[in-house]
Amino acid sequence: MVFIDPPYKSQQAERIIRELGRVEVVSPGGMLVAEASAADRLPEAVSLFTLVDRRSYGEAGFWFYVQGEADTEARSQESGVRSEKPEDYSAF
C-alpha cells in the first residue's frame, strides 16, 4: 500500500499518482490511497490505477485506488468472462 498526502490545494495528487503508475511502484492489485482536500476532484482512473472508493471526513478527502483494476475489467469484457474483484474494498 502506498499513501500520498500532497499539500492541500496544490492540485498535485493526480500528477503524483500518474508518476507512480509510470514507474510501477505499486504491485498489481496493490492499493494507493491519496489524501487531498475534500473539495478536490480526482479521476476514476489514473495511469495504472482505478478508483474503488472515496471518503470525506470534514475537509479531508481520501481516494482509494487499486493498481490494475481497469486492465482486468477490460480483459474480462473482451473475453466475455466476468471477473470478480479479489477483495471487498467497501470496508475502507
Image (cartoon, rainbow, N blue to C red):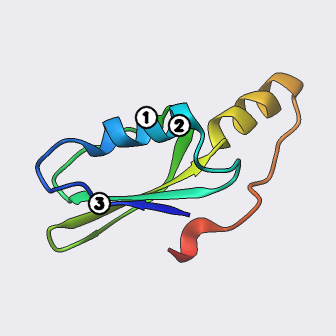
| Residue 79 x, y percent position in the rendering | 88, 26
The answer, for residue 7, to whether it is visible in the render is yes
Q: Residue at x 43, y 34 (%)?
A: 18
User: Which quadrant of the structure image shows residue 54?
Assistant: bottom left
**Residue wearing tag 1:** 18
Task: Describe residue 90's horizontal placement relative to residue 62 as left or right.
Answer: right
| Residue 74 x, y percent position in the rendering | 71, 29
Classify 44 as above or below 5. above
Classify 88 as above or below 15. below
The extreme top residue here reads 78
Rounded to the nearest angstrom, the CA distance separating label 2 from label 3 is 16 Å
Q: Is mark 1 in CB contact (under 8 Å) with mark 2?
A: yes
Q: Secondary structure at mark 2?
A: helix
Classify 66 as above or below 86. above
| Residue 84 x, y percent position in the rendering | 79, 53
User: Foreground residue, 26 or 88?
Assistant: 26
- Say which label, 2 or 3, has the lower sequence index: 3
Q: Is mark 2 in CB contact (under 8 Å) with mark 3?
A: no
Task: Describe residue 78's horizontal placement relative to residue 6 as left or right.
Answer: right
**Residue wearing tag 3:** 5
The answer, for residue 44, to whether it is visible in the render is no
Badge 3: few (under 14), some or many (20 or more) residues near its Cα, within 10 Å? some
Task: Describe residue 73's horizontal placement relative to residue 54 as left or right.
Answer: right
Task: Describe residue 34's horizontal placement relative to residue 41 as left or right.
Answer: right
| Residue 47 x, y percent position in the rendering | 51, 31
Locate the N terminus by quadrant. bottom right
Q: Residue at x 68, y 50 (%)?
A: 27
Mark 2: which amino acid?
A: Gly
Mark 1: which amino acid?
A: Arg
**Residue wearing tag 2:** 21
